[in-house]
């Protein structure tokens, strides 16, 4: 069993991954500046409140215990915000990552799993998307993730610094047994917004119904956060075995339209979703679906919670019983 530092472990995907790492018997420490994460999502005694740009603090933390690897989630993720404040994203997502990798090298920790994104592909040329499609992000958020992937490629080449970059598709759902769920402020993601509409009666806006898809709404690959967390564990264990650097898509391989998600919420909750139709959102490709064959073959990962109703049902459980306070 290994000792793993999780950056951004107070966030949505990070906190789920901490939960599954510990279930698997790994020892975990969390570093998070709590600018967007929630301290309550981190088990007692694990949290070090620190900004990754605090090079001295981070190096001291990494040198304080014999860490085997790092899983690096800490980042800002709002595409719209990144177009308004790209400098914030370069500082928080790229400069922070460089600071982390420098501290890791100083401490002799040379294995990292990195949260990347399907936004790396921009408007894909083919769907389902394979990892060899070119990285052509169309917003600063995606740009920051691609920049860090490039840095990791170079560190692999010259510093024997091994990494797995996981390009996530649409993370969603929750782990009811862990009491964890999705809490973004402001919330921009489809499933929590639809569930909020069910609870409040305030309609959710569908961003366009004139896309070249069967029902006119955008298609996305919705991946359960617990399946995503398990992909991180498979990846870190691959690195701990001495595995080489890799880039993997993480998705189910199945796309669902916005209208299909609305229908799933109606099935699961038994309630009508109030919806209103709005214009397209800037920068939304019509269809993003992952080909995750490489991850499945290389690391034996398989999504076990891919059913859309299961995903919605777990998200609904958190919306009803969980708290973002
Ligand atoms: N979407 C929508 N209304 C909303 C939020 C999202 O119609 O209030 C659509 C969005 O256009 C996209 C899909 O839902 O096609 C998923 O969007 P989300 O923001 O959850 O994730 P993204 O695909 O942008 O990472």
Image (tube, rainbow, N blue to C red):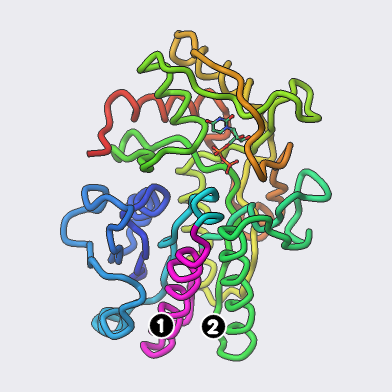
* Ligand 1 contact, mark 2 (Cβ < 8 Å): no
Residue 248 placement, left or right of 232:
right
Residue at the image point whose x is 28% and y is 37% from the top? 179
Image x and y of residue 240, in percent? 48, 73
Q: Give the position of the N terminus as an image quadrant.
A: bottom left
Q: Name the mark on residue 161.
A: 2
Residue 69 can be seen in this image: yes
- Residue 92 highlighted magenta (yes or no): yes
Image x and y of residue 52, in percent? 35, 73
Point out the stretch of residues depicted in magenta: 85-114
Q: Are marks 2 and 1 in contact (CB under 8 Å)?
A: yes
- Residue 296 highlighted magenta (yes or no): no
Could you classify mark 2 by the number of other residues whose Cα lies within 10 Å: few (under 14), some (14-19), or many (20 or more)? many
Q: Name the mark on residue 9.
A: none
Report the Cα–Cα distance between label 2 and label 1: 9 Å
Q: Indicate the secondary structure of the residue bearing disc 1.
A: helix
Q: Residue furthest front?
A: 84
Q: Is residue 209 above or below residue 127?
A: above
Q: Nearer the viewer, residue 168 or 281?
A: 281
Residue placed under numbered mark 1 in the picture: 104
Residue at the image point whose x is 30% and y is 40% from the top? 178
Residue at the image point whose x is 31% and y is 78% from the top? 54
Image x and y of residue 290, in percent? 69, 46
Q: Residue furthest left?
A: 45
Q: Indicate the secondary structure of the residue bearing disc 2.
A: loop
Q: Give the position of the C terminus as an image quadrant.
A: top left
Q: Is residue 167 above or below residue 49?
A: above
Task: Identify the mark nearer the N-term, 2 or 1.
Answer: 1
């Amino acid at each position: 069993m290994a000792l793993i530092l999780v950056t951004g472990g107070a966030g949505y995907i990070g906190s789920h991954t901490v939960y599954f790492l510990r279930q698997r018997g790994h020892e975990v420490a969390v570093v998070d500046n709590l600018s967007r994460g929630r301290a309550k999502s981190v088990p007692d005694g694990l949290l070090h409140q620190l900004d990754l740009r605090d090079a001295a603090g981070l190096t001291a933390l990494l040198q304080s215990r014999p860490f085997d690897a790092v899983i690096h989630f800490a980042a800002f993720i709002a595409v719209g915000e990144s177009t308004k404040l790209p400098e914030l994203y370069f500082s928080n997502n790229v400069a922070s990552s460089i600071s982390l990798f420098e501290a890791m090298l100083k401490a002799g920790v040379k294995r990292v799993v990195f949260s990347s994104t399907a936004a790396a592909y921009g408007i894909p040329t083919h769907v389902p998307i394979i990892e060899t499609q070119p990285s052509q992000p169309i917003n600063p958020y995606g740009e920051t993730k691609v920049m860090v992937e490039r840095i990791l490629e170079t560190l692999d080449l010259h510093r024997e610094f091994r990494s797995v970059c996981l390009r996530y598709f649409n993370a969603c759902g929750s782990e009811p047994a862990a009491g964890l769920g999705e809490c973004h402020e402001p919330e921009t993601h489809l499933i929590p917004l639809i569930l909020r509409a069910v609870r409040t009666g305030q309609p959710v806006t569908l961003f366009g119904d004139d896309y070249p898809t069967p029902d006119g709404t955008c298609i996305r690959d919705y991946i359960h956060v617990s399946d995503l967390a398990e992909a991180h564990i498979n990846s870190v264990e691959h690195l701990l075995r001495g595995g080489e650097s890799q880039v993997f898509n993480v998705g189910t391989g199945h796309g669902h339209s916005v209208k299909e998600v609305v229908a799933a919420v109606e099935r699961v909750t038994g309630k009508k979703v109030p919806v209103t139709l709005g214009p397209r959102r800037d920068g939304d490709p019509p269809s993003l679906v992952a080909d995750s064959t490489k991850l499945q073959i290389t690391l034996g990962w398989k999504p076990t919670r891919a059913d859309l109703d299961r995903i919605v049902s777990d998200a609904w459980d958190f919306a009803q019983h969980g708290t973002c306070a």
